[in-house]
Structures are given as structure tokens and as C-alpha cells.
Image (tube, rainbow, N blue to C red):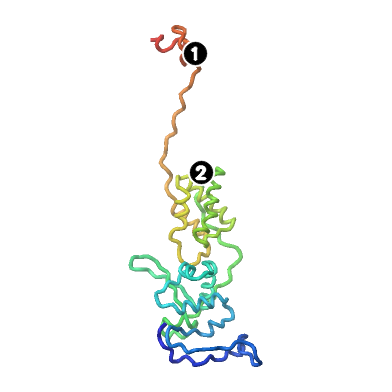
Amino acid sequence: MDEQNTSAPARAQSAPADNPSRTRRHGGGITHDNTRHTTRFVVIGNHLTQHKELSLLAIGLGCHLQSLPTGAGADIKTLAARFPEGPTRIAAALRELETHGYLRRERHRTTTGRIVTRTVSCNQPGASRREPADTACPPAKRTPPRRTGHKALPAVPQPSSKAPALLQTALDLLATLRRHDPRLLLSATDTAHLVPGVAAWLERDVTPAAVRHALTDGLPDEPLRRPAALLAHRLTDRLPPPPPFRAPAGPPAPRYDVRNCDGCDRGFRAPETEDRCRDCRA
């Protein structure tokens, strides 16, 4: 962003008449003390900075993204580490920008076969496609309103035991997932659906820490629309095999009362049918 902008006006232009932030004629309002930039600046359109439908956070984030050099990190984790708003609010602002065409996400396969998500910042949504690809973006498609009711969650493995202690351990594990990733905040209904699947892992001699790692490791960077569905898929797809079969031990040997031997009067244990100790019988 070190290029000199020779086409930028020397003074701020008046806002459109329909803009509520336009300069007032009879005193009051904002005035500007402007100095012309010659290095380290980026041109931001008023259609973004004065957008009537975007939140202030989305406008500020859109300006920040347009100022970043190519290749800079723009995923939720990187932005959350840079700003104090947190991943939830940043993810919502990114969705606003994507809805209004200032942002789009593209999936690409690397030479190693890994799928990565590339974030594209658009400075002029809806501009002509004859312009270079890095200066214009196609208009974003409006997301249709969601219908009431969600699709049923995928089925999860069922444990062979319904022991209260086992189910409580599974419930506690699911309730703490949000500490590792705020996007894994589950509703009570989703948690109740996932508890049997976690219990099925635990009864297979898998530690709670190992179950938690299997559910949270390698999550995608983009927002999770249905985290419970992703967790249900992982519980089923990554279910470990059952532990090796262990034959049950035989019945314990009977324990007889102590009796006195009729031959030597020594105490010994034996069934009532025996009246002499082993030595006397020999």
C-alpha cells in the first residue's frame, strides 16, 4: 500500500444528499483537518464506509481487509488474535461483508492435496468483470431466508451401557468443548443427541482427553453453521474399535469353615463330609 494515489482529490467531497451523515449547512456537524497521503495508504470507497446496512464492526473490518497486502492472514483465528472483538463477532462481521459482496471465500486444492480456503477482499462489489480480477468482485448472492426447523442431526454411536456416571462424563466433556473453540457452543438439545456417541467412545477405553482431541483437532477456519452436525459426523466416522475381548474369570473356589481333625485334632478347612485332615487321610 506504498503507492502514491495521484487521482485522489485534495479535499473531501460532499456526501450525497440522501446520506444522513452529510455536512449540515447551519453550523454543527463534523469538519475535516486533512493532510494529503503520499505513502502507506489505501483508497476506500464511500459505498463501504457509509454503507447503510453494514454494522460498524463490518465496515471497520472491511477497511482493514482492503488495507492488507496479498498473502496476509485473514482467517477468523488471525483476526481474533489481532482485535479484541473475539471470533464470534468477527465471524458475524465477515458474513455481513460476504452477503454484501465485499468478501468471498474460495476453496483451492494445494499440490499436496490439502483443501485450503482463500479469502478474497472486494473493493467494488458488482463492478464490471472487464476490470482486473483483484480489483472487482461479482455481486454477492443473497442468502435465502432459512426455513423454520433444522434438518435432523446425523445418528451417533450408541453405548452398550447407560450407566449414569458414564453419561455424566460424556455430558461434562461436551459442555467444555466451547473452552477450546467458542464455535462449539452447543444447545441442550444438541448436547443430549451427542451424549450417547461420546459415551460409546468412553466405554471403549478412550480417555476424555483423547475424545476431546478427536472432536476439536483440525476444525476448518470458516464459521461452523452446524457444529453439532460436524461433531456427530466425527463421532461416527472416527469411532475406534472395541477393546480386545477378555474372557471372564472362573467362579471363585469355595471357602469352607475351619474344623478339627478327628485323627490329630488339628484345625483344617474341608467339606462336612471330610472328618480328617489331608495328612491323616494320607
Residue where numbered disc 2 is placed: 160
Q: Residue at x 51, y 46 (%)?
A: 159
In this view, 244 is above or below 282 = below
- Viewer-side residue, 85 vs 107: 85
Mark 2 in CB contact with mark 1 (< 8 angstroms): no
**Few, some or many C-alpha atoms within 10 Å of disc 1 (few <14, some 14-19, many ≥20)?**
some
Q: Is residue 26 found left or right of 221 in the rendered image?
A: right
Check the picture and name the quadrant holding the N terminus.
bottom left
Residue at the farthest top position: 263
Q: Position of residue 61 (x, y in %)?
A: 51, 75
**Few, some or many C-alpha atoms within 10 Å of disc 2 (few <14, some 14-19, many ≥20)?**
few
Mark carried by residue 259:
1
Q: What residue type is labelled 2?
A: Ser
Q: Which amino acid does label 1 sit on?
A: Arg
Q: Position of residue 234 (x, y in %)?
A: 46, 56
Mark 2 or mark 1, whichever is nearer to me? 1
In this view, 111 is above or below 65 = above
Check the picture and name the quadrant holding the C terminus.
top left
Q: At numbered mark 2, what does the secondary structure look like: helix, strand or loop?
A: loop
- Viewer-side residue, 82 vs 230: 82
Mark carried by residue 139:
none
Circle nearer the N terminus (2, 1): 2
Q: At numbered mark 1, what does the secondary structure look like: helix, strand or loop?
A: strand
Q: Residue at x 41, y 88 (%)?
A: 4
Q: Where is residue 59 in the image (x, y as percent from the top left)?
A: 54, 78
Q: Where is residue 89 in the image (x, y as percent from the top left)?
A: 55, 69
- Estimate the spatial distance between the alpha carbons at disc 2 and disc 1, rounded to whole Å: 47 Å
